Image (cartoon, helix red, strand yellow):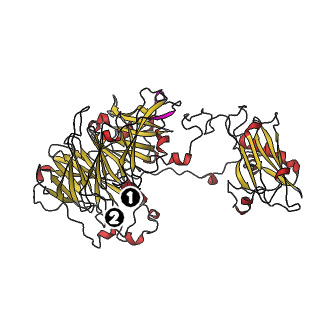
Amino acid sequence: MDSFRPNRSLLNAKFEGYKLDPIRQEDVVDRYKLSRKPTQATASSKIPLSFQEMRSRISHNHLTVDSTSGRAIYVDEDYAVCMIGVPTGKEGESVMQSSPSFRILYEMATPMETSSSVSVQREYPSSAFISPTTIAVTDGNGLLYILPIRESDTSEPIGMFTLRTGSPFDAPFRIHHAHRASATTIVLLLSSRFYPSEDFPSSINKTNPNDRSVEFDIWATKIELLSLRSGSELRELEVLWHRRGNDVPIFTEFIEQVNAFLIIGGSTYPDPNSPPLQKPYEPSADEIAPIPRAGENLDKDASMKQQSKPHPYSWTQTSDSVTVAFPLPSSTPKTKIKVLFTTQTLTLHVNSFPLESSDAPPVPMPHYSAKALWDSVNPSSCFWTWDKEGESSYGLLTLHMEKKNEGTRWMQVFASSASSLNGDEENPEVPESLDPSELANIREALEKYTASLKKGEDSSGLGLGRGVPSLAEGEMDEEADSAVGRQAWATWVGVDGQTPAWTREASGDRATREEWEQEPFVLLSTPIPGSVQENKDLHLVIKQDVDGAVYSLLPSDGNPALKWEHTSTYHALSFVLASKRDTRFTYTIPRRGVLAFEGGSARDRGANVYIYRPVEKTKDKWAKQSVLQVDDGSGGALLGVGRINEVLVCLIEGELVLIKGV
């Protein structure tokens, strides 16, 4: 079921980019000062935060919204549960005729520091709407409160609960999802960090918390509404089922059609009752010993097959000159070669261009900007020549430099090469060719080295075509692009805690595949909180090369009753998101756009939301983009985002920001 297969007809390699569609800030954005401020601060602990916890806290949404009632909940820095009444209206109507209302529902007790509490990491407070008039709230220290919402009065808890995790430390937990299983039963999906032993605080490396594997528990707990009443004593939550994985869930939802929970996270969450699945042993390349045939010398054959990468240039010298030769495709026009000599430096640029000969494989072009030479030269006596060698795939660009200090023997061509370590690709140590006739050998070595590459223009060298939209041509940064999104897995858990049978049956001939064979995907965006009112609105945006493919959970005629289908594409979304370095939340408004919210950690700069609209037609070359300022530089960091009807509700440290009509 979780096979995300792209529909090629919905991709567009000719997409050019996004054009700015200005929105007047004063027409859509309203700001309101907060008297009760939320915070990102937590108490210190003996246990350092793991990488997974740090990443989860950065993306933690401190705001909970309910579209039905038009209410939002957050917990302030003093553990007071604050409610916001957001003015709403039907689509197309004004929703800002009145100001939002603010009031305190309940003041939770401030957690006290004890010897056990400093041995575990506190969580951020979290909350969920059980109904439009009832909420569940955690204090981040192991207590859960059930609070009714009264119209004009503060609330008193009608239930207080704790979670018995079974580990030496009852870890704090957070709420991920609340499911109304029946008229009288609520199922809460919780997560907590797993603490394996009592000596855990002393055994962990405090300078590197990732030295030891960190695991996280997923708990499905049941609360009977009929048992709730004011003044109830503290009770333990009833655990329905439990899973464990290596990361905190990113997104959770209950899917009515298949009667199962969907958990998307940075790891899988296998069934603990199932026997562990062992991955078959695969020998490494060094352990594989081929069997020789009669008369076959494997050592000799291996040495012949091994092809080392040639040096980027070859050089030789006499008492008064240095000669350097660079291999270039023979189709290189002379006009593309720029050489400049100074007394101490060399500048050599060979501009990139389409090769005229399809038989010549692409090679890196030499690019040196004011590169320091080993010793001084006489610029007026230096020159260069270009030998195309038309019958060969490569020619030689030869630089002839006259030494200023005649008789001085150069150890290398460039000064940086002497201090570089072996294997430094930017400043390799290139040995001198004692025989000038060996300069031509570099041409032959380069051709042998590149002969194994398949022909083609594509960046992978696999002959699959260009594979890069024109928007990204010449501008791709593989390191930046690889950091976009989160690698994730989808785990399905039935209401009984078992893995649904159809998760394997849907794999067809792969029905016996093991857990370790599940294919991960790169998640770019999830639905904005408040937008998933019906399952038909459940969309995930997944990275597809430089695009963002929208996968919708739609009805299916087979088993299961739902399937992921590629329904639309945000072209070049992955590419444009790679340029955003302060993104805290990336959410999707179904069929309306993808919103990238900056965190706003730099107070003097503020924070923006970037809105990327879908194309009107699949083959359109342009789409619309808008930018709005969420924080003007005085409100603080962005802590939470939600959507109530046509209003975006943004919670920052000092303000509530409402954006209408997005």
Contact between labelled residues 2 and 1, with CB atoms less than 8 Å apart: yes
> Going from the N terminus, do you reach mark 1 or mark 2 first?
1
Q: What stretch is highlighted in magenta?
A: 5-20
Magenta-drawn stretch contains 18: yes
Determine crowd level at label 2: few under 14, some 14-19, many 20+ residues with C-alpha closer than 10 A.
many
Q: Which residue is drawn at 30% across and 66% down?
A: 169
Magenta-drawn stretch contains 35: no
Residue 361: quadrant of the picture: top right
Residue 334 appears left or right of 622: right
Label 2 sits on residue: 121
Determine which of the numbered discs, if any, sits on residue 53 in the image: 1
Residue 201: quadrant of the picture: bottom left
Determine crowd level at label 1: few under 14, some 14-19, many 20+ residues with C-alpha closer than 10 A.
some
How far apart, in angstroms, are the residues tagged by discs 1 and 2?
Answer: 9 Å
- Front residue (pair 21, 224): 21
Residue 101, percent across and down? 19, 48
Determine which of the numbered discs, if any, sits on residue 596 in the image: none
Residue 321 appears left or right of 616: right
Mark 2 is on which residue type?
Gln
Q: In the rendered image, which quarter contains the N terminus?
A: top left
Residue 107, percent across and down? 18, 60
